[in-house]
Image (cartoon, rainbow, N blue to C red):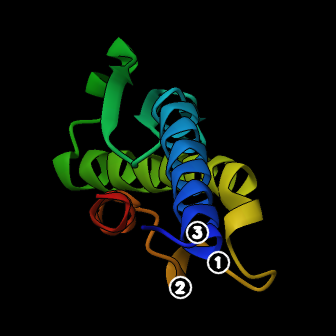
Amino acid sequence: MDSPFRLDMRAEYGRLAQDIRSTQRRMAEIRATAESDDGLIGVTVGGAGELVELWLDPRIYRAPDSAALARDITETFHRAVERSQEEVMEIVAGFLPADATPETTDLRFDPLLHELDRRLR
């Protein structure tokens, strides 16, 4: 028979797993957009930093410099990812220490959820 302490722990694990899944849904809805300095490139990424949309103004073809275009796309992509990470950090702040940063935090909660689910069984 389970003790009251054990039942409380199970309920707490269940609440934590539910909160994390809700947080994951909110993170999946994030869309962060950045434009290049000249406004000719636009990039939108999702909450995990995945590319959602890339927009190129036709005026990019006026200066046929593929290296510069690649650099500008990459820089714009990185700006969008930074914005996305800022939004993610706002959402997950309650789960993390106050000094957590995107660089020091693994924002993939699947391993934690797997462990919580295992403990609930």
Earlier in the chain: of badge 3 and badge 1, it is 3
Q: Which residue, given by chain and number where applicable, does mark 1 sit on?
A: 101
For the residue pair 17 and 105, the one nearer the viewer reads as: 17
How busy is the neighbourhood of tag 1: few (under 14 within 10 Å), some, or many (20 plus)? some
The tag on residue 104 is 2
Residue sitting at x 21%, y 37%: 64
Kind of residue sitting beneath label 3: Met
Residue 73 locus on image (x, y percent): 35, 45
> In this rendering, which labeled residue sits more in front, label 3 or label 1?
3
Name of the residue lying farthest toward the right: 98
Viewer-side label of 3, 2: 3
Give the distance between the C-alpha atoms of the residues marked 3 and 1, in whole angstroms.
29 Å
Task: Determine the image quadrant of residue 63.
Answer: top left
Secondary structure of the residue carrying numbered label 1:
loop
Label 2 crowding class (10 Å Cα cut-off): few <14, some 14-19, many 20+?
few
Q: Which residue is mark 3?
A: 9
In the rendered structure, are the residues bearing label 2 and label 1 in contact, judged by CB atoms less than 8 Å apart? yes
Report the side of 118 relative to 22 (left or right). Answer: left
Q: Secondary structure at mark 3?
A: helix
In the rendered structure, the answer to whether residue 68 lies left or right of residue 104 reads left
What residue is shown at x 68% (from left), y 66% (from top)?
95
Front-lying residue, 50 or 7: 7
Looking at the picture, does residue 24 appear above or below residue 43? below
In this rendering, position of residue 104 left or right of residue 67: right
**Label 3 with label 2: CB-CB less than 8 Å:** no
In this view of the protein, can residue 104 be seen by the observer?
yes
Q: Tell me the kind of residue under disc 1.
A: Thr
Could you tell whether 26 is left or right of 114 in the image?
right
Q: Is residue 35 visible?
A: no
